[in-house]
Image (tube, rainbow, N blue to C red):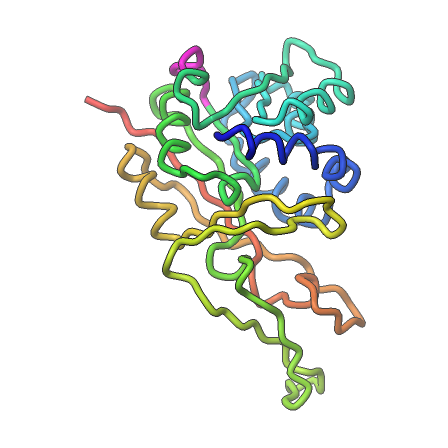
Amino acid sequence: MSQSYIQIWDRIADYWDSKTAAGNQFYHEMIEPFSLHQLCKKPPCKVLEVGCSSGLFAAKIADLKYRVTATDVSQRFIEIARSRWTQSPFLNFAKLDILNKEQVQPFAQSFELVVSNMVLMDLPDVKAFFQNTFFALEDAGRLIITTSHPAFNTSVNRFILNSKASAENGEAIKEMAISRYRDAFEGMQIGMIGQPEPHKIYHRSLNDILAPAFETGYSIVDLQELYLRKKADSEELSWQNFEQFPPVIGLVFQKNRIP
């Protein structure tokens, strides 16, 4: 990844840590439950986490006796994670650019599982991501991903509270306007309210996500649309009140044996 890309994450890492160190609603209701459920092999198996941020998920599964190498492209995130969680035979933090084949080279066929939570939409080269995670996995190893839903959770979508139409229970109908989906695009975006500066987001359709995975040699094992629980007694324009739309998608791929 470019130095300018990495430097942005170094600069905003402390702010993200202040908001997500203990996990937010997305994490507790969608990301962690999906990813934990997919850890189908009993520990101690070897896990590579790509994009560990402050290390919350890595520490969680290390406590379950999975042997975790937790990585992030941001050196600042690695420093934060090391200061918060005690490294052990079950947990190690390391700086890694997953898109850089030379950096991934030492990890050839080293892991039974690769986990990447809410990272894919931040990566400029999804094909390199699939190729390098494939390279790091043992034969028949699995790749677990959570990412922003490509159809509903992008910078060109917006919530609408239609007060002119009412549902059967008398509430205003909640709608979503989607202005662009098929074509890939990128842009600078605030991912967390109050974030000191924007970072780059890459929109891809579901086809644009799946096609390079299949070309690399992955087969898909599971795909789930993930939802938040409804927030009661509020008409706030937020994900908690738009329970008909999934903000996150969970994917599980398996590495096929290459002849």
Residue at (60, 57) in percent of width and height: 227
Residue at (68, 86) in percent of width and height: 163
- Position of residue 109 measured from the top left corner of the image (x, y, whole percent): 39, 16
Asked if the stretch drawn in magenta spans residue 110, the answer is yes
* For residue 248, above or below residue 14: below
* For residue 222, above or below residue 103: below
Camera-nearest residue between 208 and 180: 180
Q: Residue furthest front?
A: 4
- Position of residue 139 measured from the top left corner of the image (x, y, whole percent): 34, 21
Q: Residue furthest left?
A: 259
- Quarter containing the C terminus: top left
Residue at (54, 28) in percent of width and height: 3
Asked if the stretch drawn in magenta spans residue 140, the answer is no
Residue at (41, 20) in percent of width and height: 136
Q: Quadrant of residue 90?
A: top right
Camera-nearest residue between 222 and 234: 234
- Position of residue 194 measured from the top left corner of the image (x, y, whole percent): 76, 50
In this rendering, the count of numbered labels is: 0
Q: Which residues are magenta?
A: 105-112
* For residue 250, above or below residue 230: above
Camera-nearest residue between 13 and 198: 198
Is 64 left, or right, of 97 in this rendering? right
Is 131 left, or right, of 50 in this rendering? left
- Position of residue 205 measured from the top left corner of the image (x, y, whole percent): 40, 54
Is 220 left, or right, of 40 in this rendering? left
